[in-house]
Amino acid sequence: MERFQDENKWLGHFYNEIFVKCPKCESKGVLKEIPRNCECGKCTTMTFECKSCFHKIDEPVYQYKALGKHYCSNCYEKFDYESQIFKERPEMYQVKCPHCSFNEEIKPAILRTRKEPQKDGLVREPWHNLQLWFQKEVRGNVFWVYNQEHLVYLEKYIKADLRERNNNGSGNGTMVSRLPKFIKEAKNRGKLLKILEKWKE
């Protein structure tokens, strides 16, 4: 009898390396966790590199918007301004006063946000919005893993006849506790294990 005991790993435990499809050449690339320069010394970020075409992404995909309040230099009236979305942070921004139609260039306040994820039914990682390499549709659901360590841990769970939770105060925060129903169902066990076996190759 196969037995699985939850090690209380949460999904973030597998973030150290994530295999994704390169957005440039569609080959297998990898996101790796690297330390980020900060005061606490504990922060990390994810950097992408493709071994096939050498495409790199070092920063998360952000979008920028100029917005705020401004006093017109001509009529001195106060007004709100808000720009369209920019791919790069704008240093200066052209505003038009709604009161007197005076145009001027200002140094704007900037709102930085993560780029909206694509809604194409595919699973993507949360830093650069890149499509995961290991994913497959199973009975209307997407089955996916980040890397080999994630794969092996999930394989142990799916193979097990006896699945034991080891809740040490983690509540419903472990990866196993949050697995979708189709992964837990016995009828899908054989199909899921075949997929995992193929991904190991």
Image: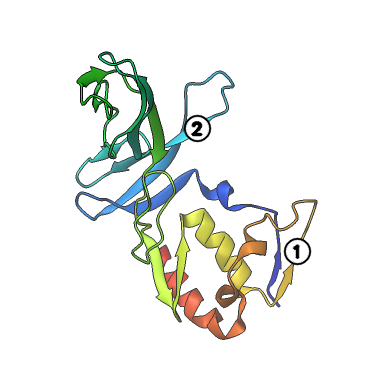
Task: State the residue position of label 1.
Answer: 165
**Looking at this view, is 162 or 89 the one in front?**
89
Image quadrant in which you'd find residue 53: top left
Number of the front mark, 2 or 1: 2
**Looking at this view, is 155 or 62 the one in front?**
62
| Vertical side of 22 occupied by 88: above or below | above
Q: What is the three-letter code of the residue carrying label 1?
A: Arg
Which residue occupies 28% across, 13% down?
73
Residue 126, visible in the rendered structure:
yes
* Residue 101 appears left or right of 128: left
Which residue occupies 43% across, 73% down?
195
**Label 2, residues with CA under 10 Å away: few <14, some 14-19, many ≥20:** some
**Label 1, residues with CA under 10 Å away: few <14, some 14-19, many ≥20:** some
Label number found at residue 56: none
Q: What is the three-letter code of the residue carrying label 2?
A: Thr
Which residue occupies 28% across, 27% down?
99
**Looking at this view, is 177 or 91 the one in front?**
91
| Vertical side of 145 occupied by 87: above or below | above
Helix, strand or loop at disc 1?
Answer: loop
Residue 198, visible in the rendered structure:
no
Distance between the alpha carbons at the discs numbered 2 and 1 = 30 Å
Helix, strand or loop at disc 2?
Answer: strand
* Residue 148 appears left or right of 131: right
* Residue 55 appears left or right of 177: left
Label number found at residue 44: 2
Residue found farthest to the bottom: 187
Of pointers 2 and 1, the one earlier in the residue sequence:
2
Which residue occupies 20% across, 49% down?
24
**Looking at this view, is 140 or 132 the one in front?**
140
